Amino acid sequence: MKTTIEIADDLFERVQRVARKEKTTFRSLTEQGLRLVLQEKQSKPRKLPPLVTVRGRGLTDEFKNASWDRIRAESYRGRGA
């Protein structure tokens, strides 16, 4: 299938240099790159960042059964929000 893509000039030049060096084509390198990206995205589940925790005793009695709206409102009290 033929298609047209727009890529950054410097990226195109780098790919052209590699293609000449490896005696292959821009098309071949582009297809290889797309296959690698698709393989990576399909084989690896999305990794979540590590959970950040702090030491403490949890919520104070005042907020143990409070809604998130109340907790948020209290955290912004006096800050103009």
Image (cartoon, rainbow, N blue to C red):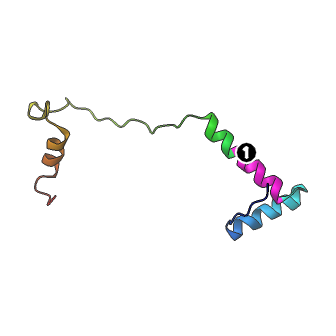
- Residue type at numbered disc 1: Arg
User: Quick check: 55 above or below 24?
Assistant: above
Q: Residue furthest left?
A: 62
Relative placement, left or right, of 9 versus 62 is right
Q: Residue at x 14, y 42 (%)?
A: 70
Q: Residue at x 13, y 30 (%)?
A: 65
The x, y position of residue 24, in whole percent, is 88, 55
On screen, residue 55 above or below 27: above
Q: Is residue 14 left or right of residue 51?
A: right
Q: Position of residue 15 (x, y in %)?
A: 77, 61
Bounds of the magenta segment: 26-36
Kindly state the secondary structure of the residue where label 1 is placed: helix
Q: Which residue is mark 1?
A: 35
In the displayed structure image, the side of residue 17 where residue 68 appears, left or right: left
* Residue projecting furthest to the front: 1
Q: In the displayed image of the protein, which residue is found farthest to the right? A: 23
Q: Quadrant of the N terminus?
A: bottom right
Give the image quarter of residue 27: bottom right
User: Which quarter of the image is occupied by the C terminus?
Assistant: bottom left
Residue 31 magenta: yes
Task: Tell me which residue sits at (20%, 30%) in the image.
Answer: 58
Image coordinates for residue 8, horizontal then vertical, percent: 67, 68
Q: Nearer the viewer, residue 6 or 66?
A: 6
- For image coordinates 70% across by 68% down, the residue present is 10
